[in-house]
Amino acid sequence: MDNPTTGHESPCQACGACCSYSQNWPRFTIEDDAALDLIPERFVNERLSGMRCDGDRCSALSGEVGEATSCLIYTVRPEVCRTCMPGDIECAMARKRHGLPVLA
């Protein structure tokens, strides 16, 4: 998908590092029950505290990290996913962990 502000593909769609950073992330934080009910059950962990992960990778992440990725639940993703922005501290930590260049 093109970034409407630049006309270019989002750097997130060629990365996915933040979605494969830790099995303890993403955690549900400020979502209300109605928002959480929109997330398909197969993507929610058994404690109902966050997204289900396969190892360190969010189960809703599709594609190859560092190549081409997408979120299978993008429109209903948790708040913590919505606040992670290309080039922010969390992005930089995840990209470093995967050996990807940090965004300027």
Image (cartoon, rainbow, N blue to C red):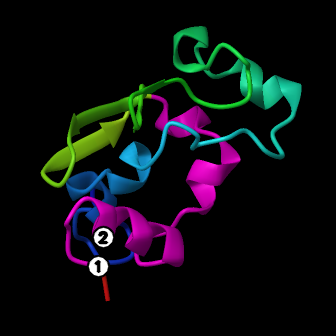
Between 18 and 8, the residue placed more toward the observer is 18
Q: Residue at x 65, y 52 (%)?
A: 80
Q: Which mark is drawn over residue 50?
A: none
Residue 80 magenta:
yes
Report the residue marked by disc 1.
Answer: 102
- Using a 10 Å C-alpha cutoff, classify the residue at mark 1 as few (fewer than 14 neighbours), some (14 to 19) or many (20 or more): some
Q: CA distance from mark 2 to mark 1?
A: 7 Å
Report the residue marked by disc 2.
Answer: 96
Foreground mark, 2 or 1, reads 2
- Residue 5 in the figure: left or right of residue 103: right
Identify which amino acid the numbered label 1 is placed on: Val
Report x, y in % for residue 87.
41, 78
Q: Is residue 5 above or below residue 21?
A: below
Q: Considering the numbered disc 1 on the image, is that residue within a helix, a strand or a loop?
A: loop
Q: Is residue 20 above or below residue 38?
A: below
Between 49 and 104, the residue placed more toward the observer is 49
Between 49 and 87, the residue placed more toward the observer is 49
Residue 86 magenta:
yes
Q: Residue at x 20, y 76 (%)?
A: 101
Q: Considering the numbered disc 2 on the image, is that residue within a helix, a strand or a loop?
A: helix
Q: Residue at x 60, y 34 (%)?
A: 76
Q: Residue at x 59, y 43 (%)?
A: 26
**Would you say the residues marked 2 and 1 are in contact, meaning their CB atoms lie under 8 Å apart?**
yes
In magenta, the rendered stretch is 73-102
Report x, y in % for residue 10.
30, 63
Furthest-left residue in this view: 67
Report x, y in % for residue 4.
37, 67
